[in-house]
Amino acid sequence: MRRIIAVLIENEAGALSRVTGLFAQRNYNIDSLTVSRTEDETLSRMTIETIADDAGVEQITKHLNKIVEVVKVDDLSEHRHLVREIMLVKVRAEGLARAEMKRMADIFRGQIVDVTTSTFTIQLVGADDKLSSFIEAIDPNLVLEVARSGVTGIARGTRTLRIK
Amino acid sequence: MLIRALQDEGVEYIFGYPGGAALHIYDAIFKQQKIEHILVRHEQAATHMADAYARATGKPGVVLVTSGPGATNAITGIATAYMDSSPMIVISGQVPSNLIGTDAFQETDMIGVSRPVVKHSFLVPSVSSIPGIVKKAFHIAASGRPGPVVIDIPKDTTDPGITAPYEYPSTVAMRSYNPSVKGNHRQVVRAVGHMLDAKRPVFYVGGGVMHGEASDRLRKLANTLGFPVTSTLMGLGAFPASHPHWLGMLGMHGTYEANHAMHHSDCVIAIGARFDDRVTNEPRKFCPGATIIHVDVDPASISKIVRADVPVVGEAEVVISQMLKELDKQLARSPDRLDRAAIDDWLARIDAWRRQYGLDEDARLEQPRDPILPQQAVRALARIAPENAYVTSDVGQHQMFVAQHFPFQAPRRWINSGGLGTMGFGLPAAMGVQFADLGASVVCVTGEGSFMMNLQELSTCLQYRLPLKIICLNNQALGMVKQWQDMQYGGRHSHSTYQDSLPDFVSLVDSFGHVGLRVFKHAELEPTLRQAFSDKNKDKLVFVDILVDPQEHVYPMAIKGGAMCDMYLSKSEDTLADS
Ligand SMILES: Cc1ncc(C[n+]2csc(CCOP(=O)(O)OP(=O)(O)O)c2C)c(N)n1
Ligand SMILES: [Mg+2]
């Protein structure tokens, strides 16, 4: 089952490698990992997307908690949550395909953020499955490059992941 | 700065080996008296010494090595300490900060190389950060589930020319690190309820019970309830072997009665143990009828292999004390709740198992016999070695024979590499223990194979006049490997024997300035051991090379893929016939 785990971690050199090292060492897979600063400059926040059963995710969260720099861990998939991902797709956009691409971008509420005579770069934001559907919906021969951010997530409602 | 912080931390010994990146530190050591530096002959040995020092005292051992090869030589010892949750601080010199990442001479990314085998690590960023890092390192190493911590220290941060105000912090506060100490009250209540309802209970304890007063508390709890106790390889000594309710070690080479008690139990109380594969055999067949209570300081150890019905996260000592209190309370409420008659039946059943296939039932052990059986050598040692001696060991058949046949009465006396199984551990471990307890009697039981993995330390032993007694069960082979080849590879001894190329150990140790003795015949066994422990040799290191039967196997041995009670009992018997 797909899991989204949010982690607050001390913003220190080496902390990230301990998290990725843990996944490698214990044979857990990482489908995506995002990491970034937070409103508190001493903390980073990670969102890890992984596939695990109940026992597996229990082990993963326990081992994440054991990493000395990890301050808090929350398995977002345990409760209602939001996930978002950003994707930049560079596509061939020549002749007839140019209008077609524009239309597809509109349907998916994407924005064309860069244009050349032969290409578009389309930006899409949304739940990660929506981004995948876009790729599936267009002619694969026209896709030149895909850059996805990986998912980031947050719990719905008043639930928060913060210290104190 | 670094040495001052170590002094303020109360460090007695540093086990180390110098080199370029550590020279500023070595100069600081030279200029002081408080901490004694022990010069080893190989960095791996320094780590085992510090590790064993920690196992004997409970205080973190300290290692100092240089960058590059010094650091990588320490890795095996760090991994050994990590697997057995031993607190240790490893300070590794590093190339100057401005050279890090340039493939400088003797540069190794020690933080990266050690990452999977440390509890935590620090790369020192500046002189001023040293006291805080040292304080945190000791705190992390010794608290919660203990483990090794690496401090990688670039040469420029130990430069005496660069100064910073020094203040050693008195406390540590880390928002990200607060290991649980006390068990959840509700779970403790549930656990005690299950214990009181048990008809076939057994305590299964591990290395976690070595800490603090846990072993004392355990004895009290087991006595109050009248329950039998077994332990892992790491837990030997936590419960006295002379106690009538002691079952011996459990697991792969555990006793018949311990493994049967586990398999037939209705309530397994695991404390400070981690359901290692060497214990459980096939986890799906593990203790089919038992409620599992699992007490451990590391939440990640709970329900990792075997699902716990009652998980209790906390330190063994504290949780057992909570259980004792709760037990009093519940017994006061209903004094007859515990079914004593059922427990007595259970103990009688265990006794019957013991009389059937217990270790003492091997008739061969009582007969003088040549070649000597390794078990006979261990039993003779147990009779002759001073009471309360520390025993360290290496890895192989000899290790299992000691675990089975040497009756440990107190915690922290049996020191061996259980988790990683590191050959070469025994001698340096004995040295570390001797430093921890200078007046104590320290014995190392080794195999000729393991001994040759760190024998250079005989030179260190002479330098510091360590009067160790080394008992080598010499079967002229990598016995444990050979046993597996006998049992699983049709007796093809691929690279497990070397009888024609072994050194003459007696003259070898003699050349290092120690005393060597040899035993060929059963009749010489006890007299020679007595000689080793005699007053005449009190201040000397004595090595006793005992030629033991190379054909002997360690039994019982778990049958792979089976339940705990499925065992080979000898070369010709197994338990499968029973069922
Ligand atoms: C460093 C290391 N290498 C290899 C092994 C695998 N191993 C386990 S036991 C053993 C044989 C040990 O021989 P010896 O020390 O003579 O003990 P014996 O089994 O003969 O009593 C070996 C090679 C190990 N445990 N550690
Ligand atoms: Mg051998």
Image (spheres, coloured by chain):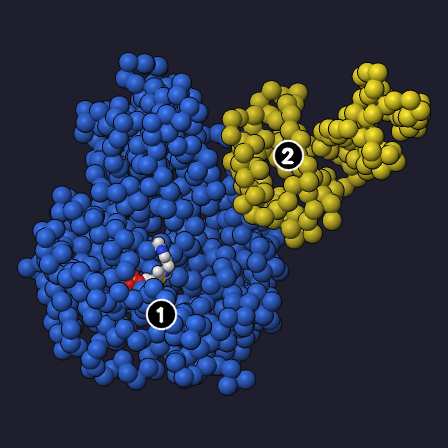
**Which residue in the structure is indicated by mark 1?**
B493
Instruction: Farthest residue to the left: give it.
Output: B536
**Residue B149 horizontal side relative to residue B187, left or right:** left
Could you say which chain is coloured yellow in the image?
Answer: A
Amino acid of disc 1: His
Q: Residue at the spot x=49%, y=68% of the render?
A: B202
Q: Answer whether residue A103 is visible to the viewer in this image.
A: yes
**In the rendered view, does B127 fall on the left or right side of A92?**
left
Measuring 33% from the left and 23% from the top, which residue is drawn there? B155
Q: Does the residue labelled 1 lie within 8 Å of ligand 1?
A: no
Q: Residue A78 in the image: x percent, y percent?
A: 74, 44
Asked if residue B407 shows in the view, the reply is: no
| The C terminus of chain B, quarter of image | bottom right
The chain carrying label 2 is: A
Which color has been applied to chain B in this rendered view?
blue
The residue under label 2 is which amino acid type?
Val
Percent across and percent down for residue B395 are 33, 60
